Amino acid sequence: MKITIITVCYNSARTIEKTILSVANQTYKNIEYIIVDGSSKDKTVDIIEKYHTVISKWISESDRGLYDAMNKGIAMATGDLIGILNSDDVFNNEFVLEEMANFHQKNTIDASVGNILQHKENGKIIRFYSSKYWIPEKLKIGFMPPHPSIFLKKELFNTLGNYDLGFRIGADYELITRFFLKNNITWKYSGITTTAMLVGGLSSSGSDSYSLITKEIQKALSMNGLKFSPLKIQCRFLWKIIGFLKK
């Protein structure tokens, strides 16, 4: 089983070397590693070229944003499974892809969802973000599994489509809604903690971001013909607190 890992980057010289090394250090070796750079102005491309023996394919050119770059990576992919590793994140340990390959070989599924760790720049872990109790119906109240923990069969993108560029920060939510809820793909919780993720991304900070992603969640559900309560989506932060207290 070949696993394609896609890293999208722009001016990521400060972090991307650690990302690349976390792929290079995997015990599983049937990896296709693709990097899509948005024509960086710093030393990102120099670092990519330094590790040309680790990277299967890479391009550096202007794009229409994060999701356009992801779609470019998917178009280049030839693996059986596709996973996303952000340019300021690393795999949780060197066994992640070996465990992922074993899990998918043992289970006849289209996709798996797992867990991630979120940490600050000083390395302090501030959240264990798990998919253990997630089900697709929770998309209707604003909950998705952590995007970097999801591994999807390549063929799904061929049949169900790629990331929708009509979204600014919610195209991953729309794609997961389209795949898991509208089209009922087969999936399973892997239990694998795939990624150590640096907090502070595009969709994870500020009240303006919360408002925008709320609108885009509703847009994603509407365009896929799904009924939902706008109020429940607006109040999803309260559901998180309630769920935490119950645990």
Image (cartoon, rainbow, N blue to C red):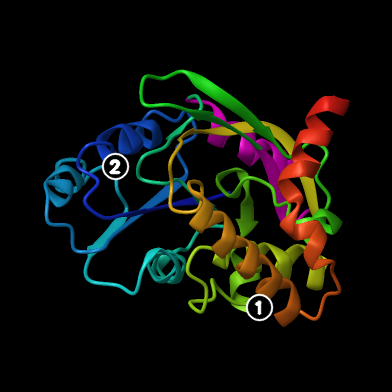
Disc on the earlier residue, 2 or 1: 2
**21 relative position to 229: left or right:** left
Q: Determine whether 135 is above or below 153 in the image.
A: above
Q: Which residues are magenta?
A: 94-114
User: Crowding near pointer 1: few (<14 within 10 Å), some, many (20+)?
Assistant: few
Check disc 1 and report its element: helix, strand or loop. Answer: helix
Picture coordinates of residue 118 (x, y %)? 53, 31
Q: Nearer the viewer, residue 139 or 99?
A: 139
Q: Residues within 10 Å of mark 2 (few under 14, many from 20)?
A: some
Percent coordinates x, y for residue 200 in the rendering:
43, 41
- The residue beneath circle 2 is 54
Magenta residue check for 196: no
Q: Nearer the viewer, residue 213 or 191?
A: 213
Q: Work out which quarter of the rendered image holds the C terminus and state it.
A: top right
- Name the residue beneath numbered marker 1: 159
Q: Quadrant of residue 163?
A: bottom right
